[in-house]
Amino acid sequence: MEPQEALRRLIAATPGFMPEDEGMALYNLARRSRPSASEPIVEVGSYCGKSTLYLAAAAQPERATVLSIDHHKGSEENYPPFPYTDHKLVEPYSAQINTLLPFQQTIRLAGFEDTVVALVGASSTIAAAVTVTSSLLFIDGGHGALPAWIDYDGWVSSVKYGGILAIHDVFADPRDGGQVPYGLFLAALHSGEFELVLEVGSLRGLLRKNR
Ligand SMILES: C[S@@+](CC[C@H](N)C(=O)[O-])C[C@H]1O[C@@H](n2cnc3c(N)ncnc32)[C@H](O)[C@@H]1O
């Protein structure tokens, strides 16, 4: 069942970086990946939970789980000189972004507290400590070269055979956006492990081939 009207309104009101057409495509990829309690969806880059809502809407009917990873301190591109600072999310005393409370509020308002597990910390630290087989891995964390490649290297092997790797902000043309996620996309494609199954906006969906 597609996200209902109330959920769509909450998604629209949630701060974040997920246009509706890409969000619906992500939802459909997540449904296709057949998530389950033992093979959850893994998201790297929760921010305030906008993309998480699409993933959770796909997971909930299966009683599956979304593990959503973020240190909730924002990415380098959320700070000056980049234009993506949301000043409502900046703590007054530390001058640092904190998206943890808005994320928790988003998940609670949606009624997804039993579906979404927030893993709060650096993606690399959590990857080193946690072993999981994911139905779908969504990479939308830091877009700088170092954090993005750490996310890819730390999590890509979690995707089950027949599962989905989704990458956001993939731009082949540098005039449209940064090239790092595009590099991850090419690495997955050229590895021979994945085949492209979806292109919507800057979202790419890759199916992990069966052995
Ligand atoms: C582009 S935003 C995610 C947007 C979100 N998926 C949405 O739909 O609105 C990237 C997020 O990745 C997080 N992040 C960046 N580097 C990280 C790292 N090394 N470990 C954990 N989280 C990180 C930031 O805190 C930020 O919330």
Image: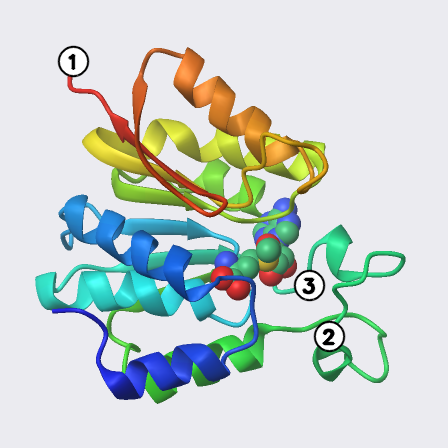
**Identity of the residue drawn at 58% across and 36% down:** 171
**Identity of the residue drawn at 39% across and 42% down:** 130
Q: Is residue 28 above or below residue 192?
A: below
Residue carrying label 3: 73
Measured as percent of width and height from the top left, residue 57 is found at 24, 68
Name the mark on residue 86: 2
Secondary structure at numbered mark 3: loop
User: How would you rate the neighbour count of disc 2 (Cα within 10 Å): few for under 14, some for 14-19, many for 20 or more?
Assistant: few
Q: Foreground: 98 or 126?
A: 98
> Does the beta carbon of the residue at mark 3 sit less than 8 Å from ligand 1?
yes
Query: Which of the four quarters of the rendered structure image does ligand 1 lie in?
Result: bottom right
User: How would you rate the neighbour count of disc 3 (Cα within 10 Å): few for under 14, some for 14-19, many for 20 or more?
Assistant: some
Say if mark 2 contacts mark 1, CB within 8 Å: no
Q: Is residue 118 above or below residue 153?
A: below
| Sooner in the amino-acid sequence: mark 3 or mark 1 | 3
Q: Is residue 188 visible?
A: yes
Residue type highlighted by circle 1: Arg
**Identity of the residue drawn at 70% across and 33% down:** 174
Residue type highlighted by circle 3: Lys
Q: Is residue 153 visible?
A: no
Name the mark on residue 211: 1
Measured as percent of width and height from the top left, residue 48 is found at 53, 72
Measured as percent of width and height from the top left, residue 190 is found at 43, 12
Measured as percent of width and height from the top left, residue 7 is found at 30, 82
User: How would you rate the neighbour count of disc 1 (Cα within 10 Å): few for under 14, some for 14-19, many for 20 or more?
Assistant: few
**Identity of the residue drawn at 66% across and 42% down:** 176
Q: Quadrant of the C terminus?
A: top left
